[in-house]
Every structure is written in C-alpha cells, then in structure tokens.
C-alpha cells in the first residue's frame, strides 16, 4: 500500500519528458527497451528519499539488517543499551514472538568480519543479557534482513527453542583448561620410574651407539606422559562431577594443554563449583589452570539453521 | 597454584573458540545469502535443520572432540537421505515403466483405430 502511494507521488514530477519512467500501469504501451531499463533504475533509487513521510517511526533503509546475538524467553520487548556491534555501539533490543525474543541490534547488511572488536561486542551483549536471562547463544555473524525474517525463525523453531531454553534454564558454562610444564613432568617421571632412570643413565654414560636406548627411552616417556595426563584429567573430571550438570571435553590445543573442558553449572551451585575448582588448583601445584566464565552455554547447545524455500 | 576466574570476555581466544561455530550456527554460505537479496526475494526462509543439547557428564579422557556427535547425527541424516533417494529413484523408475507401458498401449490403440478408420474408409 505505501509503496503504491510513493510511486504515485513521485510520478507527477518526471525529470524530463524523454526520461519519463514507464510504470506498470503504462507498461501496456509498447516501449523501447532502453527506456524500460532506465525506468527500472529510477524506481530502484526512489526509496532513498521517498519513505520518510510514509513510515516515520522506523525507517529501516534498504541495506540495513539485524544482527542476532542470542535467543531468550521474554514476552515483553526489552532494551539493553548501546552495547552492540559497530563503530558506535548499536542499541541492543529484542524482536519478540510470543514468549520468545531474539536479542538484536541494527547493523549494515553485510557479513561481519570476526574482528577483535566485533567478536568482543558479540560476547559483551551475551554476557549482559545472561545476567538476567537464560540464553541460547547465536554463533558470530548472523544477520537477518528484516524483523519479519527473525519472527519467522522464532515461529518455525518455536517448540525447539522453548525446549532448549527450558533445558538450559539458570545454567551457565564455565571453561577449564589445564596445562602442564612438560619438561618438569618428564623430570618427575625420570625420578619416579626406575626403568626410565636406568635408560637415561645408559644413554649418558655409553660411548658407542645409544640409538636403541634412546628409542626405548622416548617410547617409555611418551607412555608415561600419556598415562599421567589421563590420570590428572580423570581426577579433575571426577572432582567436579557433583557440582556440575554436564561437561564436555574438547580437544586440547598445543602440547602444553592436557585438558580443554566446559562445564554446565546451575546458578545455585555456581559457588560450590567455583570453590571446587580453586581447591583442585591448590591440590595440583604443578598444573596451570585457566578458568573462565560464566559463559552462555555454547558448548552444550548445537542448533543448525538452514535455508528453506517458503511456500 | 592459585586459580583465578577470568570473565568470559577477557581472552579473545576463548571467545573465538566459542562464538565461531557453537550455539546456534548458520552455514557460512547461508549467512552470505541472507545478506544478498536474491534468496530472500525468492522467498526463502531460515529454519532449524538440527538440534543437539549435551546434558551428560562426559568422562572423556581421550581426544573425543566436541564435534563427534553432530557429525554422527549428520552422517545418520545423510544416510537416511541417501536411502530415501534410492527409494524415490526406484519409485520413479517404476512409474516411468508403467507410463511407458501405458504410452505403448495408447499408441497401439491409436494405431488400431487408424487402421480401423482406413479400412472402413
């Protein structure tokens, strides 16, 4: 409806007779093709100046989209302040559908690069929203064209989102990475293990070929390191079992890391979890702990979205 | 050693580790097509393809990566799609066969009619 009005408004003032834009109403007349294409161009330009009087409240320009940070439960529309992605932090608010809400901010309709600023802004919004709400975090860089697209997603995934939100209710994720000083552990192993100590002595004293002894030594060290890391990790998991709901083990990164895990913890056992982690830290004085959180439950939810043709 | 808790946003690596491929994930090419206008104008919409939650306490001592389960799920989905494809192809072949039989019958009938016409005429 408003678009038709715009067209009619714009029509009476063609820039020149020769460039009169052929419209659909006049399309019945035979028009030469260059004119048609020019008319199309002009029509495409029109919204740049026309929409303001028609939609004064929310004028989303053609190339503006909505960046989505997370999904929460809320029947009211909420605002979280200027925290969002953008050179000047965008205002973060919700797009609601029944009891679900997507936390969004306006952004240019482009694929956002995961720069330091952008990624931290994404996390900042999630952290802020998480203080008051249970969130299903969105992975970085999802931009929808309009609010309607987002509402359509909330509508089509309504039950699934509600189900996941119920499962994650009042739960946070904590990250725990455990690192060790490999050389220090090797020295320890050498002290404790008689075979290894003997081999080492052989290697350092022998004058001829030490090839076999070195091979044997290396193999025994590897086995001992593996066994020890498995023991540590199993003990740490076991120690945190009764203060968390779930845990996931990710692949350790680099050769200093022996454990890269995430724990799902309820709001009311957070303190107990925290105390336990610190206690473990003091128990293993040779290990380094990197303990982070609270996070939204990234490691405990995996929802994949796809495109489907609407009918 | 004393363990201190760091807030989520303090380590970029930890943030990247999570935000790039965890939570609600949309394929990179879909992400691109969402901002390109074409797919929207042909009335595509975004829907959920799969959902997994992980509410078990993993013992996982070894290197069982975080991606093992979704991959398996995808594999299963993939196999079911393949199976469906085979079934559909079989159906299609059957339909074609009956169609060609029908077509042959029609042809024969027409030929018969023509013959009849020519003999009558």
Image (cartoon, coloured by chain):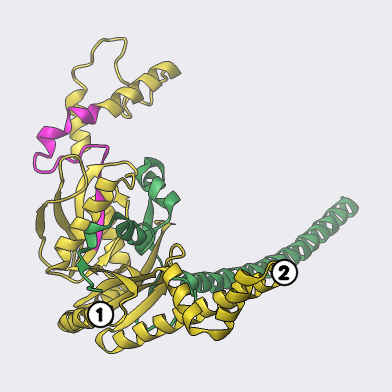
Residue positioned 46% across, 65% down in the render:
A255
Image quadrant occupied by the N terminus of chain B: bottom left
Q: Position of residue A50 (x, y in %)?
A: 17, 29
Q: Position of residue A74 (x, y in %)?
A: 14, 68
Query: Could you say which chain is coloured green in the image?
Result: B
Residue on which the image places disc 2 = B94
Residue positioned 31% across, 9% down in the render:
A18
Q: Are marks 2 and 1 in contact (CB under 8 Å)?
A: no
Point out the stretch of residues depicted in magenta.
A46-70
Q: Secondary structure at mark 1?
A: helix
Q: Residues within 10 Å of mark 1 (few under 14, many from 20)?
A: some
Residue A51 on the magenta segment: yes
Residue on which the image places disc 1 = A282
Left or right: residue A3 versus residue B57 is left
Q: Is residue B13 above or below residue B60?
A: above
Residue positioned 24% across, 54% down in the render:
A122
């Amino acid at each position: 409806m408003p678009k038709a009005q715009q067209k009619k408004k714009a029509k009476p003032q063609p820039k020149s007779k020769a460039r009169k834009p052929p419209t659909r109403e006049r399309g019945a007349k035979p028009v030469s093709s260059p004119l048609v294409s020019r008319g199309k161009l002009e029509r495409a330009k029109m919204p740049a100046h026309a929409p303001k009087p028609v939609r004064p409240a929310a004028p989303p320009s053609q190339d503006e989209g909505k960046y989505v940070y997370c999904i929460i439960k809320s029947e009211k529309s909420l605002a979280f302040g200027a925290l969002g992605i953008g050179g000047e932090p965008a205002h973060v608010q919700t797009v609601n559908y029944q009891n679900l809400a997507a936390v969004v901010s306006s952004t240019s309709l482009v694929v956002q690069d995961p720069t330091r600023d952008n990624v931290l802004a994404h996390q900042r919004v999630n952290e802020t929203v998480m203080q008051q709400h249970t969130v299903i975090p969105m992975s970085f860089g999802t931009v929808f064209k309009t609010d309607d697209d987002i509402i359509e997603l909330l509508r089509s995934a309504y039950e699934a989102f509600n189900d996941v939100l119920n499962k994650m209710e009042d739960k946070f994720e904590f990250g725990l990475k455990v690192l060790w000083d490999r050389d220090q552990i090797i020295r320890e192993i050498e002290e404790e293990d008689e075979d290894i100590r003997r081999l080492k002595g052989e290697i350092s004293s022998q004058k001829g070929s030490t090839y076999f002894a070195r091979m044997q030594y290396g193999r025994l060290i590897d086995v001992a390191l593996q066994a020890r890391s498995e023991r540590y990790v199993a003990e740490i998991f076991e120690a945190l079992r009764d203060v968390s709901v779930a845990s996931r083990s990710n692949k350790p990164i680099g050769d200093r890391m022996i454990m890269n895990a995430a724990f799902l913890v309820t709001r009311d056992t957070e303190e107990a979890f925290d105390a336990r982690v610190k206690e473990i830290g003091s128990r293993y004085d040779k290990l380094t702990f990197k303990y982070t959180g609270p996070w939204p439950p990234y490691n405990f939810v995996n929802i994949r979205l796809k495109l489907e043709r609407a009918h | 050693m004393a363990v201190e808790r760091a807030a989520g946003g303090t380590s970029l690596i930890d943030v990247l580790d999570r935000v790039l491929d965890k939570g609600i994930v949309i394929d990179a090419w879909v992400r691109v097509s969402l901002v390109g206008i074409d797919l929207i104008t042909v009335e595509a919409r975004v829907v959920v393809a799969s959902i997994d939650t992980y509410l078990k306490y993993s013992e996982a001592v070894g290197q069982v990566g975080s991606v093992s389960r979704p991959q398996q799920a995808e594999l299963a989905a993939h196999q079911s799609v393949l199976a469906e494809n085979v079934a559909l192809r079989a159906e299609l072949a059957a339909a074609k066969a009956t169609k060609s039989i029908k077509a042959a019958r029609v042809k024969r009938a027409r030929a018969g009619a023509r013959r009849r016409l020519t003999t009558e005429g």
